[in-house]
Image (spheres, grey):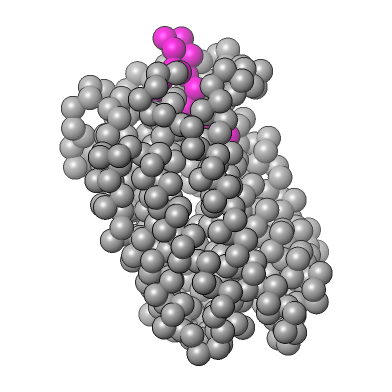
Amino acid sequence: MPQNKLPISLLLSYGVTAIPLAMLGLPLYIYLPTFYAQNVGLSVTLVGLILFFSRLTDVVSDPLVGLYSDRFESKYGKRKPFMLFGGVFLAISFYALIHPPEIYRELWLLVFSMLVYLGWSIISIPYLAWSAEITTSYHEKTRLSAAREISTILGALAALLIPYLYSVSEDAGKSIDILYVAFVFLLLIMLPLTLMGVKEGEAKTSHNVGYKEIKKLWQKVPTLRNLQMAFALNSLANALPATLFLFYVELVLQEASQTGALLLLYFASGIVGLPFWTMLSKKIGKRKTWQASMLLASTAFVFVPLLGEGDLVWFAFITFISGLSLGADMALPSSIQADIVQKIQSAKKSYAGILFGIWAMLTKFALALAVGLGFVILGAVGFEPDAPTPLALITLALLYGTAPVGFKLFAFWMIRDYEESTPI
């Protein structure tokens, strides 16, 4: 596609599928661990370990999905068939995951969480890779990513509002059930809009790109390797608070009734901030803008461990400030990777699918590590949701507020040498 400005209709058509995916993503990453720990009755340590090990399969499956998406050929294109199949597979797998039987609950969580992550990969990796192929323009790729991530935030906001409106936001099980129905309904509408509204075009088909060549790329292009490592660290920094949010608000702040309102504030501020980050990236570049967003979030979050019962207003202020960085965290790293994909793409080789497969793998590995790390450490200090000890509450506050700052600063350092003007 030429480097002309993308029409709004195309941006909307591409972005809308992110709405139902985000609506499923919120219960998957926030409500599911709590649901299996409180409603199903598994220990927090066991839930953390099972979800961590189930996501380890993404180390293999995500790059493979990306690789075969690059190699796939059909009269319907190379990305669209994967997305259609992945949507159906994801809906069926998640329904089973949130309806565990009375027996073999641990095995059920392991198997169906693995299948859910696989279905998520099959739809989301081609969806992400497509953004590197729709346009070759530097700034239009940012607009395309921004359209997708605004839809993601809108989906997350809807996922928060629906349980809140039905007065079940404090019940993880009921919230998951309602959000699943909403997810299926919107997927049936939004996915066809994307598949029919965006022309896939003549993307390069690659039969000879594999893991060995990706390893050579990392050696040849340290920019790519450092970007992906920084993205993984930053994703971990974001995933830890997301995983522990419900516990932190309920047990440290003693404000369980305000969880929905706080999450709404966070995602709403993300929408408010995204246009600013998009404009700033045009002036100082994507890398510096992303780094600025990391510093803003870190500056706000460093005060979280000092809060306690009665500090709801201060926490809401921190939530708003850190939420402003959300849009930059979501849109800019993937846009930078799309730029790198554009530079290394050759006449006979397509790298978009496999590189975004690795990207998705890093995202889910960070989320898995957040659940595993957070829940295992809490279990080691004797954390019990019904009767937390002072040591458990201090540990929870440090995991929620201090550890993410360290990870973000490390990510900031990892991409310090990336120069967007330097050709690869």
Side of 389 relative to 261 (left or right) = right
Main SS, magenta region, reads: helix
The location of residue 102, given as percent across then percent down, is 76, 72
Q: Quadrant of residue 230?
A: top right
- The quarter of the rendered structure image containing the N terminus is top left
Residue placed furthest toward the bottom = 310
Q: Quadrant of residue 309?
A: bottom right
Side of 23 relative to 409 (left or right) = left
Q: Quadrant of residue 308?
A: bottom right
Q: Residue at x 44, y 41 (%)?
A: 333
Q: Residue at x 50, y 66 (%)?
A: 301
Q: Is residue 123 magenta?
A: no
Q: Residue at x 45, y 53 (%)?
A: 294
Residue placed furthest toward the top = 347
Residue 163 visible in the displayed image: yes
- The span picked out in magenta is 342-360
- The quarter of the rendered structure image containing the C terminus is top left
Question: Quick one: 88 or 112, which is closer to the camera?
Answer: 112
Side of 40 relative to 341 (left or right) = right
The location of residue 218, given as percent across then percent down, is 59, 24
The location of residue 252, given as percent across then percent down, is 60, 82
Above/below status of 179 relative to 67: below
Above/below status of 69 relative to 363: above
The location of residue 81, given as percent across then percent down, is 45, 33
Question: Quick one: 195 or 244, which is closer to the camera?
Answer: 244
Q: Is residue 357 magenta?
A: yes
Question: Quick one: 36 or 76, which is closer to the camera?
Answer: 36
Q: Residue at x 60, y 32 (%)?
A: 63
